[in-house]
Image (tube, rainbow, N blue to C red):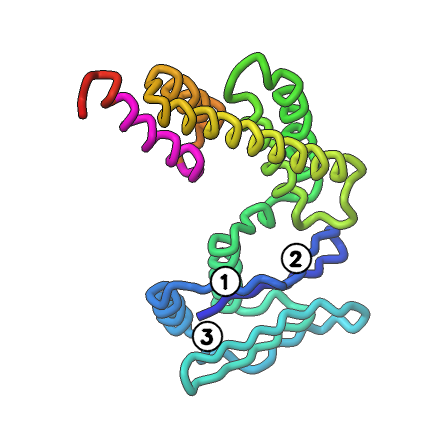
Amino acid sequence: NELSVQLDDLENRRHVPGGQRKKIDAGKVSQLAHEIRQQGFFDLQESYRGLATNVWDQWDLSVTIGRQTGRVRVLNTVGPDTFRRLRDLLEEFSRNELGLAALALTPEKLLEMAEASALLARSLYDQRRVKNENLALAIRSLREAEWYLETIEPKPEFYADVVALLEESERELEAIYEDHMFQAERAIRLRDWQEAALHLRSICEKIPERADERHTNARRRLIDVERHLKGGK
């Protein structure tokens, strides 16, 4: 129940190294196996060949489910609809499970989107003291740019700037979090609930993503501090 995908697309300059090893829910695997059988993969011929002799365009697909194994090779032809549907099924499953949805876009479009995200990130980073959430939003835009470029080879010149600014931004945000949390802890020990609430609210504003553990931790502490502010025990 593990998934790994390797892609080397010389024509479109796309590359996925194939080092992933993602555990897949057994129910999803069973459903995929059922759909493969329903598509009729094991009823296909072993080989489909076109007449062209001066090209080499091949699809080679092997599937093993339990003790049943099938292999189909399609050379210099489009192949049967069943093969195409199954190929699309497997590619879609892989993109969704490994977060490789960007493979559905052209390299030109990915470069365009990555550059736009990088420019937005730089603007947000430069204005990080204007609004509390700007640094976190810059980090999100940088991660988007990095994700768009994940399968692109060679990487564009601005990729190095994206990686460097992302590392710098993440270090800065972590330092801000640690400082505010230290000040909040100190205030809590001194029973200065107003001061503690101020620092905990700052963390929630500067790290607005609720899925972030730092936001969750600060929010949980803030609820307790606000209980003291309201006169609760």
Mark 3 secondary-structure assignment: helix
The circle on residue 16 is 2
Q: CA distance from mark 2 to mark 3?
A: 26 Å
Rendering coords of residue 171 (x, y %): 62, 35
Amino acid type at image mark 2: Val
- Quadrant where the N terminus is found in the figure: bottom left
Sequence-wise, the earlier of marks 2 and 3 is: 2
Amino acid type at image mark 1: Lys
Residue closest to the far left: 232
Mark 1 secondary-structure assignment: strand
What residue did someone put label 3 on? 41
Residue closest to the far top: 130
Q: Quadrant of residue 9?
A: bottom right
Amino acid type at image mark 3: Phe
Query: Label 3: few (<14), some or many (≥20) within 10 Å?
Result: many
What residue did someone put label 1 on? 22
